[in-house]
Image (tube, rainbow, N blue to C red):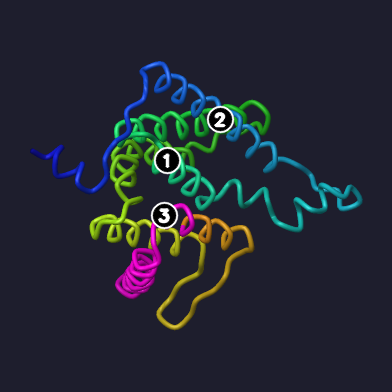
Amino acid sequence: MLRKKLNKIRTPQEISKNSIIFNAVVFLVLGIILGIFSKWLDNLAIDDTVWWQHFIGLLDLGNFMSGFSIWLLLSLIIAVFSNAPLSAAVNVFLFLLGMTVSYHIYTVIFSGFNPMGYMMIWYGITLASPILAFICWYARSRSFVSMLLSGIILSVMVLTCFGVGFWYFDIKSILDTFAFIMAVVVLHTNIFSTIGALVIAVALAFGIRIVF
């Protein structure tokens, strides 16, 4: 009964078991690679005389890759474009697990310290990610429930990508703004749903900031 109701929101696509396993492995490896790349950027001593390093410093790419918005966006993309909610849960979990563990190990080995307090936040997010990814999968549809879910997701992106307060709205960086725009694009199904989700997102984001 519950499955039928969920299928009315969004219907899973059937793919082979081999494809499911292959996708899971790909996302695990991708997470490992990006986790290492992120910490490498964080450790990189920028030399402005080198054009590509100057570009990295200009965009503040190291801090961006060590922040939340990019990983929320990538997790969202993986979740909503998975073939089914269970696949979304597994794929996102493996992606974040690979990223978090590789980032942590790289930090300990090459940076010479163990940021356990910071990493516990990411391990907590990783453990919660299967449930969140399962829910997020249903956000990319044209139902009213999907619009509400999209609004909630985008409100989190608003709070992550921008400085929001009762009387102000600040842009943190170009890359954070780009991450938010990409989240809107990823969740877009039609104009009505997107506008509705944005209204919900802004209202929730400002409401949360006012309360907390």
Q: Which mark is residue 81?
A: 1
Where does the image place residue 145, in percent across and percent down from the top left?
Answer: 23, 56
Which is nearer the eye, 73 or 46?
73
Circle 1: element type = loop
Q: Are marks 2 and 3 in contact (CB under 8 Å)?
A: no
Residue 148 appears in which quarter of the rendering? bottom left
Q: Which residue is mark 2?
A: 30
Question: Looking at the image, which residue is at 32% across and 73% down?
Answer: 207
Q: Residue tagged by mark 3?
A: 187
Camera-side mark, 1 or 2: 1
Element on which disc 3 rests: helix
Horizontal side of residue 154 vs 34, given as left or right: left
Q: Earlier in the sequence, mark 3 or mark 1?
A: 1
Quadrant of the snapshot with the C terminus: bottom left
Q: Label 3 neighbourhood size at 10 Å, few (<14), some (14-19), many (20+)?
A: many
Disc ID at residue 103 = none
Q: Residue furthest left?
A: 1
Q: Does residue 23 belong to the magenta stretch?
A: no
Quadrant of the image occupied by residue 11: top left
Image check: 14 left or right of 22? left
Amino acid residing under circle 1? Phe
| Percent of width and height locating residue 78 | 45, 39
- For marks 1 and 2 on the same chain, the one whose residue lies earlier in the sequence: 2
Going by the numbered disc 2, the residue's amino acid type is: Leu
Image spot of residue 71 (x, y percent)? 50, 45
Foreground pick, 175 / 184: 184
User: Is 197 located above or below residue 25 in the figure?
Assistant: below
- Residue name at image x 43 percent, y 46 percent: 76
Label located before the other in sequence (2 or 3): 2
The image quadrant that residue 123 belongs to is top left
Q: CA distance from mark 1 to mark 2?
A: 16 Å
Read off the magenta span. 184-212
